[in-house]
Image (cartoon, coloured by chain):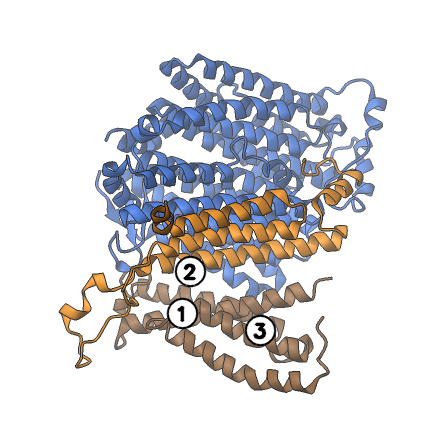
């Protein structure tokens, strides 16, 4: 597999970045121009991601030297098979959420579209850069761009979101600072920052204390960023209090790229045997993943607020992927990466549905969603199909990633993990079916539910008028720009189930084999 | 909101110091390649001159000279200048930000200078904007 | 023991500063003090990585001229004479990131104060929970 030069990596990062800085000037002159420019930039990114995927599949990994300087003196951008898949996923999801956000942002954040879209494009640029780069310190820069913009986006709604955003700032900065420390330690013993160069130099230094410390700090820092239990404390508040479009996009992207960075360093910079033999962090990761799976699902069952339940469900799903990483076999890693992709698509769809419900009815409590299927049939259907995919019902996408994880655990003889996966899936069945039951088959006792105090996110004084609308069962479906992305994502999760073999064999296996085949 | 200071000593001193601070800021930007300094440091010094003026004379005086619209435009201009330099190098055939291809004498030095100036402009405008937003928040 | 302390002075300093910052982040209830703790935490790490580039008797990484103000290759390209500039440059970026994070956090604190009237974390959580919002960040 040969590597060849291509301008694609820089285009995919530069386009949203330039558009993000054109927007304030354009928006000052004419506010309605913000959304079209953002849409054009995101569509361009998605197109470049498709071109990148096709080039990688036909020719092999792409490479780009920034400034013309060859590594290890210069910064290198590299897109291999796994990177191409992640770029496709991220650009697609951010494009769909941007289309969705037109209506929901005009309702939740009136007159603040220009800063919203400008910061949103900067988030997209940071995400693309994190996937495309092959330089450790450049990864830190893009990680911080992603983090800072997500802090700003979470807090942009006001109300309780600001306190959650502050907690997110403190914890996220600790995680990024730990990553910086690990890069400093690695640089001090190897003298290089390029990932390919490090993978060449490091095997001789595996017993050095500095490398072990760097590795430990890296794993802790990335675990904070991807909300691995017990470092997940920022996630429920941030996901549930943020505006709807923001919840969807950061739930689907920021934790996923942090896990992608973990996989990159664990399996591509360091050899897999380092994580297993020299410092047995994979055992620790797999146990923390198993605990996250079970405890996240248990916490999700007791939640009464829909978005908070989805946030705890995210904690559990991240546990699945980390369990796969912790198994450190080809099958386990394939399951982890496939589950990453499935979870991003499904969780985005679920949060979009929750946002559409909030947009139309102003409700957030699960118990108040009685007979929602009559009022918003398409939204309820999209939520249900996505929920079934998350539980792991074949032939939807979620089933296959859990199958890979279970096969990986069985291969290793880890029956506790198999039990944890099955138990957690049963719990997921419980809390999702609870919501679906209220939407389709509510209990025949409406008085018990009417006694629940109406509580909506954001400023309590804004939504009292629309909160009574649940008594009005006439059909009032979400608008097309909000419904379209939801239904497209449902279609994608069905396709991910249908084509999972292709995805594994064409994208994931070549990337994983370059790591395990050394 | 910061009101204008009443003491004439403070006002005169602020007014005397600001040009020197700005000159020093420009010096730090321009000489970033051969002495400690560069785009970010020079930009912060330039911003501090505006903040000193705001503390001495009140925020309204500064807004008359450097309005919020201009601050927004300057923030974007710096970054876009940076991006355009890179894209010009891309269009001329070399890699992004590969200054060696620019058709001037000492292309790498001139390219670095343009980059530092653009960073300085953006940082200055960003810090003035942050100061303004933090002060006028109610 | 003294040799160990003097030899590893930069590591001991940064660990002490990092722990002070960590204590401030977790042990204090005022949000501004938490922010200051986060700042100390970040700055200690930056200090450590900058200290990695220090070298005794080395000069700044600007190309030297010899006595005739020419660029004599043997004089100029002796890399042992120069301080390693890469840690400084990388940490410059990290400092900018730290400043931006502080700016975002300060804006959030202003908003919290204008909305809730307090910056103490326990009072804040009480106010949010008693306002009936179940989505308050839990303890």
Residue holding disc 3? B70
Q: Is residue A441 left or right of residue A322?
A: right
Q: Position of residue A454 (x, y in %)?
A: 80, 35
Q: Position of residue C68 (x, y in %)?
A: 17, 81
Distance, label 2 to label 3, CA atoms, is 27 Å
Residue A105 visible here: yes
Q: Nearer the viewer, residue A362 or B49?
A: B49
Q: Chain letter for mark 2, please.
A: C
Q: Nearer the viewer, residue A110 or A402?
A: A402
Chain assigned orange: C
Q: Is residue A72 above or below residue A55?
A: below
Q: For numbered disc 2, what is the local secondary structure?
A: helix
**Does mark 3 fall on the same chain as mark 2?**
no
Residue holding disc 2? C92
Chain assigned brown: B
Q: Is residue A2 above or below residue A119?
A: above
């Amino acid at each position: 597999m040969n590597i060849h030069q291509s301008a694609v990596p820089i285009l995919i990062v530069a386009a949203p970045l330039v558009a993000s800085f054109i927007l304030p000037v354009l928006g000052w002159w004419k506010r309605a121009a913000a959304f079209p420019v953002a849409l054009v930039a995101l569509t361009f990114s998605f197109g470049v991601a498709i071109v990148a995927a096709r080039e990688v599949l036909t020719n092999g990994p792409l490479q780009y030297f920034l400034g013309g300087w060859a590594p290890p003196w210069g910064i290198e951008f590299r897109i291999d098979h796994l990177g191409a898949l992640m770029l496709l996923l991220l650009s697609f999801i951010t494009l769909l959420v941007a289309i969705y956000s037109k209506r929901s942002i005009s309702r939740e954040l009136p007159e603040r579209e220009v800063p919203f879209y400008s910061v949103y494009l900067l988030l997209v640029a940071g995400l693309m850069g994190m996937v495309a780069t092959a330089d450790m310190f450049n990864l830190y820069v893009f990680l911080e761009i992603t983090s800072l913009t997500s802090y700003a986006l979470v807090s942009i709604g006001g109300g309780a979101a600001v306190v959650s955003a502050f907690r997110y700032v403190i914890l996220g900065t600790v995680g990024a600072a730990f990553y910086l420390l690990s890069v400093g330690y690695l640089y001090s013993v190897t003298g290089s920052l390029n990932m390919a160069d490090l993978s060449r130099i490091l095997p001789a230094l595996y017993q050095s204390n500095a490398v072990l410390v760097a590795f430990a700090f890296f794993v802790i820092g990335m675990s904070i960023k991807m909300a691995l239990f017990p470092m997940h404390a920022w996630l429920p508040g941030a996901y549930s209090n943020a505006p709807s479009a923001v919840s969807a996009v950061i739930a689907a992207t920021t934790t996923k790229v942090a896990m992608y960075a973990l996989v990159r360093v664990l399996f591509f910079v360091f050899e897999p045997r380092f994580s297993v033999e020299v410092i047995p962090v994979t055992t620790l990761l797999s146990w923390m993943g198993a605990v996250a799976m079970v405890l996240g699902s248990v916490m999700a069952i007791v939640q009464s607020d829909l978005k908070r339940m989805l946030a705890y469900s995210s904690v559990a799903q991240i546990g699945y992927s980390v369990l796969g990483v912790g198994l450190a076999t080809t099958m386990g890693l394939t399951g982890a990466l496939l589950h990453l992709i499935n979870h991003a698509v499904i969780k985005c769809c679920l949060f979009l549905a929750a946002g559409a419900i909030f947009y139309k009815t102003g409700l957030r409590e699960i118990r108040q969603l009685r007979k929602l299927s009559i009022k918003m049939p398409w939204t309820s259907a999209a939520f249900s199909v996505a929920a079934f995919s998350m539980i792991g019902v074949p032939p939807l996408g979620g089933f296959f990633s859990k199958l890979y994880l279970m096969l990986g655990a069985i291969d290793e003889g880890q029956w506790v993990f198999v039990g944890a996966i099955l138990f957690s899936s049963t719990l997921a069945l419980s809390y999702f079916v609870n919501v679906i039951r209220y939407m389709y088959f509510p209990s025949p006792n409406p008085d018990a539910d009417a006694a629940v105090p109406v509580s909506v996110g954001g400023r309590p004084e804004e939504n009292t008028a629309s909160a009574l609308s649940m008594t009005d069962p006439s059909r009032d479906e979400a608008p097309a720009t909000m419904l379209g992305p939801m239904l497209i994502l449902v279609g994608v999760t069905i396709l991910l189930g249908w084509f999972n073999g292709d995805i594994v064999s064409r994208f994931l296996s070549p990337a994983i084999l370059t790591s395990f085949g050394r | 909101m910061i009101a204008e200071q009443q003491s004439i000593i403070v006002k005169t001193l602020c007014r005397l110091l600001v040009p020197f601070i700005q000159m020093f800021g420009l010096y730090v930007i321009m000489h970033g390649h051969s002495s400690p300094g560069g785009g970010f440091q020079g930009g912060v010094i330039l911003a501090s001159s505006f903040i000193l003026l705001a503390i001495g004379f009140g925020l309204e005086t500064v807004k008359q000279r450097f309005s919020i619209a201009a601050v927004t435009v300057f923030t974007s201009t710096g970054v876009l200048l940076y991006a355009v330099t890179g894209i010009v190098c891309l269009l001329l055939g070399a890699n992004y930000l590969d200054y060696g291809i620019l058709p001037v004498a000492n292309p790498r030095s001139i390219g670095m200078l343009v980059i530092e100036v653009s960073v300085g402009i953006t940082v200055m405008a960003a810090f003035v904007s942050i100061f303004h937003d933090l002060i006028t928040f109610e | 023991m003294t040799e160990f302390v003097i030899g590893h002075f930069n590591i001991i300093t940064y660990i002490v500063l990092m722990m002070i910052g960590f204590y401030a982040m977790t042990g204090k209830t005022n949000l501004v003090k938490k922010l200051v703790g986060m700042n100390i935490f970040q700055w200690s790490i930056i200090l450590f990585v900058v200290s990695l580039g220090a070298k005794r008797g080395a000069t700044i990484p600007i190309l030297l001229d010899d006595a005739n103000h020419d660029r004599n290759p043997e004089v100029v390209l002796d890399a042992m004479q120069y301080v390693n500039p890469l840690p400084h440059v990388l940490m410059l970026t990290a400092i900018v990131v730290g400043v931006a994070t502080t700016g975002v956090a300060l804006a959030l604190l202003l908003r919290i104060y204008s909305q809730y009237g307090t910056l103490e974390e326990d009072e804040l959580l009480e106010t949010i929970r008693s306002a009936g919002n179940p989505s308050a960040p839990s303890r």
